[in-house]
Amino acid sequence: MRGSSSDVLLARFADCIFWLARYIERAENLARILDVNETFSRDSRGGQNWRSIVQLNSDEERFFATHPAATAQSVVKFYVIDSANPTSIVSAIRYARENARTLRPLISTEMWVQLNVFYNHLAALGEDDLTPGRLAALFGSIKEACQTHTGITEGTFFRDQGWYFYQLGRYIERADPTTRLLDIKYHLLLPSPTDVGSPTDVGQWNALLRSAAGYHAYRRLHTASTTPARVAGFLLLNQAFPRSVHHCVREVSQLLSEVKSRYALRHANDAAEELDRLRAVLGTLDISTILSDGLHEFLDLMQQQLNAVTRDLSIAFFGYSPEASQAQTATPQ
Amino acid sequence: MELSILDGYDPQSFYCEMLRSSASQVIRQRLSGLSIEALKERAAAANAELYNLGITFTVYSDAQTIDRILPFDVLPRILSAEEWRHIERGIVQRITAINLLLDDVYHDQHVLRDGVVPAELILGNRNYRPLMRGIDLPHKTYVNICGTDIVRDERGTFLVLEDNARTPSGVSYVVENRHMMLRAFPDLLDDVSLREIDHYGARLIAALQEVAPAGVGDPQVVLLSPGTYNSAYFEHVFLAREMGVPLVEGPDLLVEDDRVYMRTTDGLSRVDVIYRRINDDYLDPEAFVPESMLGVPGLMRAYRAGNLALANAVGTGVADDKAVYAYMPRIIRYYLDEDPILPNVETHICREPKALRYTLDRLGELVVKPVGEAGGYGITVGPRASLRELDECRAKLVADPANYISQPCVNLSVAPTLVDGHIEPRHVDLRPFAVTGSSTWVLPGGLTRVALKRGSLVVNSSQGGGSKDTWVIG
């Protein structure tokens, strides 16, 4: 049967829309993490740890090649306005806009205009805009612009195949910083292995929750107690928290099986099965088991699994060869 | 009459599209109710909106890409119903003749054997495609989309300056300018019987479906673009959206067993009609420029096998060649036995010794154009050129006379235009867009381009041109 145009989605467009969603999600997450670090992440001596932000993004090598030290100023500049840094917010939004430009036949005009204006605004920022007094408002406006994008998309984007690939990108990307945050902060906040499970600086754990926009939800669940294990359990396994790894994996799994059945897409069966399995594992594990078996190993496995899903989608739907899919990131050449 | 923002506006000896038009009375009255400040404010808002909407073309300089808007002038260019009827008939006549010419050139070549057009001019033309010989196209339509450049002289006569029969661009601005006008000046348009232009996409896809390969029930149409870095990418997006068809790039397509497919999330899907915004040269590396990364290997095999329609057809560049243009009046008489409704601008073909001598003798009065270029590049406007520019032009003419034509300097008509907070006369042209499937339809109005520099006659967007909304009233 010949499908009408609306049933057919170009492989290249599926790729672009998947990454459009990822870059926006990435920018929002990064803005939140920087905001929290700037505002809340002070230890008892009033010091802030900016090096961990660089570690979080695995950027040590690139960052320290051009910066002698990870200061508030240098890290914020590197991650907000440095357009030569591919992991900066301005780069993420530039990639998102480039993808949106390609996707203009598919996305709504309102989506495009908002992103176009957002990018032009970010590209015009200079160091003057990064003074301490202005940062909170700046991060707020970046988060809000990303959320505005999400809202416009929800309200105007046609619900065809493209919508599924958008959502898949969003949830896969969302799980990523949660695992990275936990991996780095958990061990950073527990200086020696013997400290694991002991109450430490509660403020730092609260900041970790805030970095994932989970502080108040956590409070509702665990009214008075902040323990490292509970925080980790909440960020990894809570089913109602929209940024938990479990929630993201469940969404990804459902979206993939839905798009496959609704549009009779024949590929990516292995990825669908793997996601089912992962979802089942997350639904049965408890945090104490994860901690005793090794949190780092578990988080590493999660990241590998999510990377594998991206790889599988790239080969099954986006037209990548298995070799090319190793290093792909729908980044405009 | 009350004080008007047009008071003090002086078009001098040029034909003014606003003051001389019978249809502009109502608009002039309404404009008189506006202050120049209000006009400036609305103009600034409209141009800012174009930028935010990304209704831009891309210019490349110093390895940087810059998105520019085509500056939009808020004072519309007016055409009366009678003026439009004349233009419309002239364009339909011309496109009919062009399609007959192309069918003849790629089949029996009567026009060459009867000596109407020098054979060498066609067969030696770089845009002549021997690969097209003997291919029968549905409805014998070669030029599905045509943009005819029309100017108006100081007496108000419409003249055809150029036929753009390959991949003419600009239609997106026609529609977007109208949208901008409706938003910025809803009050100007009340109760004016303005011809609709919103259905261009619907007319276009209907025409493209009409030329689909025989036997295809529900043809899949796609628009083939060179990609986001092409300066006309916005227009490609616009057209794909207005038609509701996929916007593809070369690597999205492939040819298997002489059939064209696009790569989708579920594998390969058939393609029947391609509106291609890529020049012949880059369309198929197997058939044309082998290094082309933009095209699709094997596309011409599918085309020759009758499994694919291309719009426009391959090889239409011989018809809009600036030297062949000079023969258009004769071509129209030859095929249609009619006088041209829209005359040509008098043209001297420098490959002919007499014309070359004439041109060299009057270089300071003439406009000299290379025959193969588009976008206003390489043009020397005699009366405005420096002595050095004239010398350079003379050297080029002598070195390669066949590459040039010359024309008298037409004193293009002007229209009131908002420049630096004043309303001043600026020269304009008109590019109506015609769509041909089994028959020809012309979008009412077209793109009015305006040379924003004082006294300039060059309206091209790449050289400081802007545009206006074009109103066909009545």
Image (spheres, coloured by chain):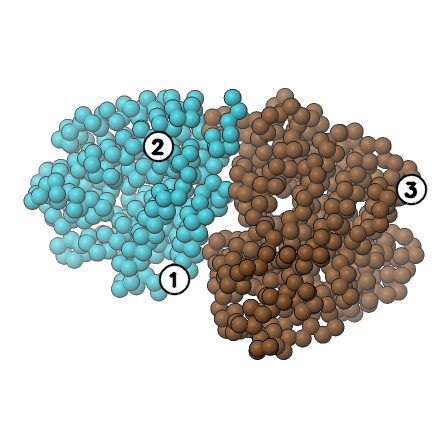
Chain colours: A cyan, B brown
Tell me the subunit letter for badge 2.
A
In the depicted structure, whether residue A65 falls above or below residue A262? below
Label 2 and label 1: CA atoms lie apart by 34 Å
Tell me the subunit letter for badge 3.
B
Disc 2 designates what residue?
A307
SS of the residue at dot 2?
A: helix
Q: Is residue B466 visible?
A: no
Tell me the subunit letter for badge 1.
A
Circles 2, 1 touching at the beta carbon (< 8 Å): no
Closer to us: B191 or B218: B191
Label 3 and label 1: CA atoms lie apart by 68 Å
Tell me if B358 is positioned left or right of B139 in this view. right
Disc 1 designates what residue?
A126
Which quarter of the picture shows residue B405?
bottom right
**Kind of residue at badge 2:** Asn
Disc 3 designates what residue?
B115
Q: Residue at x 64, y 65 (%)?
A: B24
